[in-house]
Image (cartoon, rainbow, N blue to C red):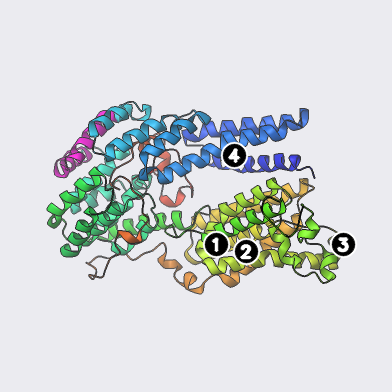
Amino acid sequence: MDWSRDFVLIVMFSLGLQILIWIRHIRHAAMRPWLAKGILLMSTLGLCLWKAPRLAPWIAGIGWGLLVLLPILVFRWVQATGAANPQRAQRVTSIVRWLHPFAPWWTMPLIWKAYALQGQGRVEEAIEIWSQVPEMKEEAETFGEMLRMRQAMQWDELAETLWEEAKQSEDMTFSVKLAYLLRSLGESGRFAEMEEAALRYESALPALGEQVILFLLAFFGQREALEETLQGVRSLSPATQAYWRAVSMATQGQYDEARAILEKALAYKDVEPLVKNQIQWRLEHLEALVPYEISPALRRLLLTQHRAYSERHKLNIFASPEKQKRPWVTYAVASGLIVVYLMQAGILPSPLRGMAMLRWGAFSPPLFWGGEYWRLFTSNVLHADAVHLSVNLFSLLLFGPFAEGWLGRIRFFVLVFFAGIIANCLLLAGTALGWMPRYYLLVGASSAIMGILGAAAAILWRVHSRIGSSLARRNFFFLLSLLLLQAVFDYFSPHTSGAAHITGAFAGLCLSLLLFPKSRLQSLPAVPETPITETAASSEDIPTSESTTPTEGVLASESNPTEAATEDATRTEESRTTEEKPSTPPEGSPPSS
């Protein structure tokens, strides 16, 4: 069976989706080279299909895999894990940047080198590196001075300098400066001025990312909201997470508990010098953090910011809402599909030989009616070739974690297991009614994977119906458009079963309505609206860093100047409310630490 044409169609289909996403983010200057590259590759593939069909699969594989997919995946992986190991991030980006030699990706090695030096306390060397980054040249001197004061723990002086400047200006054009203003005011215990600054620059806060959530929630003593926020952050070291927990406890007057957490954090392994100095300084100035009664305006701001942060992390359809839990069922299903295919190909021992689909258990209505009922299941774990398997694995790993995180591992396994079986049963019904041909062979996990997409759409719609989330609504319609494009692709591809995909999506949607945990539905209002308290909470035990992801990185207070440089270029657009921000904003710089 010749799958080369289907492979090219799959690449063009995926590339078309990516182009739509780039167009959605066209206001970001960093996305325009990606868009141009995507359009050029799409045009080249179309020309090859017309003039040189034999070259089309090679150009599709090399162009899509090396020039688009690989750099995107690597840069996202580096952004998610780079803070834990900046040296590794520097080495990886110095190689991968040649696949996309445009700003800000081209300067990534410099950025991560400076980031690593910064965390090691080698501030002067870091400042020298930052001055070589084009996006930072105009603010290099200002940023360098802030770094020096931050390294010396001169929070009072830094707060005074930046606050005086803020009084004379209605807008801070350098977002890193705003982050340092909020942080320095909090560290020096000037909570009234911190509240005033947060309210004054409320429209600019979303551009600061997760760091502003940590600053505000910790310094204003919002422990429950802080805990939920920390669960969505995977790049912070255990010592850093312990620091913010201790700050939130100290601002509630629980100094003994806070001191115990900080002292324990100092004993953690591989604590970076910058983090260690910060913890030691805070131990000496712990009583400077006093309980503060927040105003209704600030309570509204904290609620809005935390709701937007929770939505971005819990409703991102390309990731699990439970950041601290691995999607093990998704990984297990993917591993099982790989093992079965290796057995089919004869690479692993098996009782059967060859790729004959009938012997392995392909689904066929006449054989089913002849008593071979097990084919309802076995057809869902078989694949025709490596391309078929690869496409299904990619889709499973892309959308599986979201559904597994919302449904839970057992319910998600039930969904995957029965979605394909129900889809085959519906195909049998279609055959009995004369809507489907009587004789055909069907293999592949795509009906079960389409069931995952149908379940994800149902989850998003239920969340939107419950809490009125605009992000859930946008992602719901994105999945609907994805299903529509899949139907268009099935129409043009002779080797795919559009009926199996449609029935799989329908089965997944129905199953999710039955499997969605009622407790999760009842608790949905608390997801984006974690209570924001006005008084000190009780002295309940706070989980220590052993319960968090064991990654090492620089202190969460350190603002990311590269992200700021990218955001400053589009400050006017980015000053909109958080609910208007895309669910998956363009990535391309180290994560805000």
Instruction: Report the residue marked by disc 1.
Output: 329
Q: Write the residue at 26% across / 54% down.
A: 268
Residue flagged by tag 4: what amino acid is it? Ile
Sequence-first disc among 1 and 2: 1
Which quadrant of the view contains residue 304?
A: bottom left
Q: Tag 3, which secondary structure?
A: loop
Residue flagged by tag 1: what amino acid is it? Val
Residues at circles 4 and 1 in contact by the CB criterion of under 8 Å: no
Residue 483 locus on image (x, y percent): 66, 53
Residues at circles 1 and 2 in contact by the CB criterion of under 8 Å: yes
Instruction: Report the residue marked by disc 4.
Output: 19
Residues at circles 2 and 4 in contact by the CB criterion of under 8 Å: no
Residues at circles 3 and 4 in contact by the CB criterion of under 8 Å: no
Residue 353 locus on image (x, y percent): 76, 54
Residue flagged by tag 3: what amino acid is it? Arg
Magenta stretch: give its range. 140-166
Specify the principal SS of the magenta part: helix
Q: Is residue 586 in view?
A: no
